[in-house]
Amino acid sequence: MIGRSLFALIFLGHSAFAQTVLLQIRPHIGDTLRMHLSQSVEMTGTTPDHAGDSTSMTTSVEVFTRAIAEQWTSGGTLMQTITDSVKATPASATGLDGLRRRALQAKRVWLRVSPDGGMEVVHDTDPSSELQEIFGGMPAMLARQPVRVGEKWTREMQIPLSGEPGAMGLVKATFRLDSLGRNGDIAFVSLHGTMSRADASGAAISVASYTTSGTLSGTIQIDRRLGWITDSRSSIIVRSTIAPTPARKGDPPRAPMQVRTKITQWIRAMRAR
């Protein structure tokens, strides 16, 4: 009897490991999802010419949003998002930043979310709004075919470089389905990758006066029954070298500035009760 039970456990374990699952973002029409985005950006600059003097700055933002699944389309699910509140640190009660944060609250934006996780803004009256940066830059991450526990897949994607308007980074990331939980309803995925500066065509470049490289890591938790990512944590560390231009022709070159940027992001989501 004990031998049979042990054999059954081993068989079930092997069956679960060999099971293939399709990881897709496909929320149910009519569902309202509450999302909480927390992001911090820490920048440190060091100038060797000034005996290693360094300056640092840290900013953070919290965004509370509701997303309502409205319609399935050939390109993915059309969703209406409503921003309930935005909190930034350091806060500015006056000035342009404060006005823009207040304008985001109660704003409605329509997104198209593809099954592999990519997001694009399909309707927003302000093309320069923060929501364009938060949602419009979400790249596709999931495998397009069924995968097994332990299986890996790679994706190349572009993300905006923080602090450099218009500049993009080329990310090469490897994802792995680590495990399944709750009878296969929850998928746990990890990711690791590298980043380099990209030109307008999307190819990696390295300019003599400005070089950028970085690493990223993170975890993703997908509720397959809900059809949504319920927990996503990522950390990106970017190191940039900026060679200043001489003030006058013939001046000796100055030592380049070293800039380290750490971006930490945590997104949580749940179905509204």
Image: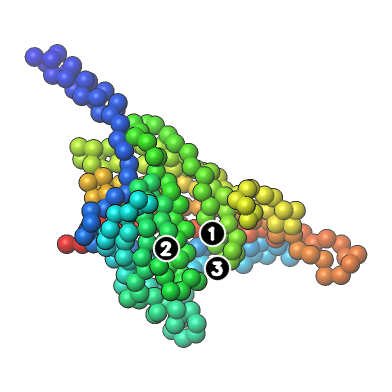
Question: Residue 5: x percent and y percent?
Answer: 13, 19
Picture disc at residue 121: 2
Q: Which residue is mark 3?
A: 57
Q: Left or right of 32: which side holds 251?
A: right
CA distance separating discs 2 and 3: 30 Å
Residue lying furthest bottom:
94
85 relative to 176, above or below: below
Badge 2 marks a residue whose secondary structure is strand
The structure residue drawn at horizontal position 22% and vertical position 46%, both measured from the top left corner, is 225
Badge 3 marks a residue whose secondary structure is strand
CA distance separating discs 3 and 1: 19 Å
Q: Left or right of 45: which side holds 16?
A: left
Q: Which quadrant of the figure contains the C terminus?
A: bottom left
Q: Which residue is mark 1?
A: 160
Badge 1 marks a residue whose secondary structure is strand
Whether residue 169 is visible, yes or no, is yes
Report the front residue among 201 and 239: 201
Mark 1 Cα within 10 Å, few/some/many (few <14, many 20+)?
some
Tell me if label 2 and label 3 are in contact, CB under 8 Å. no
